[in-house]
Image (cartoon, rainbow, N blue to C red):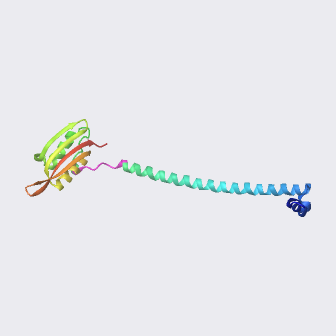
C-alpha cells in the first residue's frame, strides 16, 4: 500500500527532485517576487510622501489664514457708546454705579455692595426692558454677571422684577 505522499512525489517526478537547475529557477522567481514587492512598497511610500506634502501645504495655508484673522481681530477697537469712555474694570463698584446712573434706576436700587466675590446689586420694580438694558450697560462696562436671581413680583396689577446680580470683571 502506497501512501498518498509517495504517489504525489512519483507524479511530480523530476520537479520534486533536488535538481540544481530547479533550485536556481526557484531563487530567480523568489528574487523577482521580492523585487516587485519592494518596487510596489516604494511606489506606495512615494504616494504617501506626496499626500503628506499636500497636507502640510494645506495646514500652512490654514495657519496663515488663522494668523491673519487673529491680527484683524486684535486690530478691532472696542466699541464705545456715543464717544463715552469705557470705565475701568479694575473698579467694578464704580462701573456698576455708573451703569445704574446712566439707566436712571437709582431710585429702585435696594443695595449696592462689594465683596471678595464681586459686586452685588439688588434692584426692585424693574420691567423686562429695563432689566435687559441694565445687563447691556453692565456688559459695556466690562462687567460679567456671575450669578443672578430674578423674581417676578406683582406690583399694582402689573408684573415687575426683583433682580439680584453678582458681577465680576471681564478681561
Toward the front, the furthest residue is 1
Q: Residue at x 20, y 50 (%)?
A: 150
Most foreground residue, 37 or 101: 37
Q: Percent x, y for residue 110?
A: 13, 43
Q: Quadrant of residue 117?
A: top left
Q: Residue at x 37, y 47 (%)?
A: 74
Assign the C terminus to one quadrant of the image. top left
Q: Percent x, y for residue 46?
A: 66, 55
**Helix, strand or loop: magenta stretch:** loop
Most foreground residue, 64 or 140: 140
User: In the visual, does 138 lie left or right of 37?
Assistant: left
User: In the visual, does 97 lie left or right of 28?
Assistant: left
User: In the visual, does 16 lie left or right of 143?
Assistant: right
User: In the visual, does 73 lie left or right of 146?
Assistant: right
Toward the bottom, the furthest residue is 11
The magenta stretch is 74-81
Amino acid at each position: 500500500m502506497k501512501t498518498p505522499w509517495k504517489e504525489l512525489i512519483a507524479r511530480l517526478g523530476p520537479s520534486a527532485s533536488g535538481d540544481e537547475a530547479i533550485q536556481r529557477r526557484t531563487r530567480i522567481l523568489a528574487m523577482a517576487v521580492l523585487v516587485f514587492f519592494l518596487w510596489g512598497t516604494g511606489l506606495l511610500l512615494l504616494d504617501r510622501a506626496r499626500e503628506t506634502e499636500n497636507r502640510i501645504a494645506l495646514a500652512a495655508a490654514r495657519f496663515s489664514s488663522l494668523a491673519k484673522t487673529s491680527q484683524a481681530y486684535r486690530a478691532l477697537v472696542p466699541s464705545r457708546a456715543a464717544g463715552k469712555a469705557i470705565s475701568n474694570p479694575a473698579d467694578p463698584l464704580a462701573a456698576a454705579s455708573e451703569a445704574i446712573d446712566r439707566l436712571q434706576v437709582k431710585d429702585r436700587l435696594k443695595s449696592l455692595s462689594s465683596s471678595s466675590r464681586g459686586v452685588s446689586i439688588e434692584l426692585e420694580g424693574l420691567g423686562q426692558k429695563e432689566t435687559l438694558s441694565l445687563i447691556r450697560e453692565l456688559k459695556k462696562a466690562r462687567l460679567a454677571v456671575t450669578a443672578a436671581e430674578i423674581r417676578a413680583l406683582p406690583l399694582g396689577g402689573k408684573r415687575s422684577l426683583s433682580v439680584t446680580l453678582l458681577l465680576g470683571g471681564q478681561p
